[in-house]
Image (spheres, grey):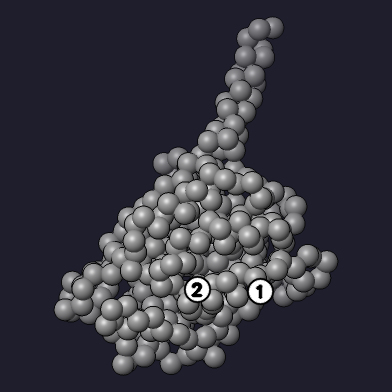
Amino acid sequence: MRARYAVPLGITAVGAAGVAYAAGFEVRSFRLRRVTVPVLPRGMRPLRVLQVSDIHMVGGQRKKQRWLRELAGLRPDFVVNTGDNLSDPEGVPEVLDALGPLMEFPGTYVFGSNDYYAPKLRNPGRYLLEKVRGEHGLNGKNDPAIGVRRNPWEGLRDAFDAAGWVGLSNSRGRLKLNGIEIALTGLDDPHIKRDRYEEVSGGPEQDADFSLALVHAPYLRTLDAFAADGYPLILAGHTHGGQLCIPFYGALVTNCDLDTERVKGLSTHRAAGNTAYLHVSAGCGTNRYTPVRFACPPEATLLTLVERRD
């Protein structure tokens, strides 16, 4: 009798330990990744870019708030926020408190779906089902505003803008950094079909020292458009790095049509004969209804942009 129950009890114990680790430790095991990207024109000094993404702030997340504030000690040249700051309609003040020290630096931002709409309780298994069906985001489904509470995203926008951060919702902008001019192009979130590339098409601005593209969710249609137009670097978030990964294998899903091999970190994307660097942040938060991470710790990234090798 004892042997009969030993295996299932052992499996149950291992599963329970895994859930406890994912929900109690790894989801709060914040870390900084450092990446070097050889993308700048010859003769241009290195630029240090801090990317934060997918904060998904919920009230009371004090450790996350402290960690985000401490990132200001890195003293980046500028900050890039690739969206999904909220996972609580009441979370705007805590996001702004956490990002306050970083807002002393030049910065730019795009929004994600969770900035606009409050999260809903859903079966996490739907992500695997959507992958099998080839469905991602709206894909013709009803507008998420129907039956979903809206987040007060305008408060984030107004505070970011007041700090001098450049908002890039289907628009262009510029950052001036001690004699260096960075041209910025960004899209609103493709995951909820708010992207309008035709409004920003045309490629990098030739009179700038460097051009950078931003989007929250790295859908292939947006990566193709940016790369085809000749942008050298694209920054995105959204994927959570897979969030629940299998050790020595990696992510099962990306929550968009990007392949799992590029679910996080630095890679390249090629379209129309052009190749762009792509960096996808695994982000530092989770949806409030799935507060777990496994083999995919929360992160921010310090990207050091250096001269091209060619």
Mark number displayed over residue 259: none
Q: Residue at x 21, y 73 (%)?
A: 45
What is the quadrant of residue 185 in the picture?
A: bottom left
Q: 260 or 182, which lies in front?
A: 182
Residue 256 visible in image: no
7 relative position to 271: left or right: right
Amino acid type at image mark 2:
Ala
Q: Residue at x 32, y 92 (%)?
A: 206
Residue 146 on image: x %, y % = 81, 70
Pick out the residue farthest to the top. Answer: 1
**In which quadrant will I find the C terminus?**
bottom left
Q: Residue at x 53, y 44 (%)?
A: 63
Residue 1 on image: x %, y % = 69, 7
Vertical position of residue 307 compared to residue 209: above or below: above
Q: Earlier in the sequence, mark 1 or mark 2?
A: 1
Residue 22 visible in image: yes
Vertical position of residue 153 compared to residue 15: above or below: below
User: Label 2, on which residue?
Assistant: 163
Mark-to-mark CA distance, 1 and 2: 14 Å
* Label 1: element kind: helix
Vertical position of residue 166 compared to residue 88: above or below: below
Vertical position of residue 52 compared to residue 284: above or below: below
Q: 65 or 172, which lies in front?
A: 65
Q: Residue at x 60, y 46 (%)?
A: 61
- Crowding around mark 1 (Cα neighbors within 10 Å: few <14, some 14 to 19, many 20+) is few
* Number of residue marks: 2
- Crowding around mark 2 (Cα neighbors within 10 Å: few <14, some 14 to 19, many 20+) is some
User: Label 1, on which residue?
Assistant: 154
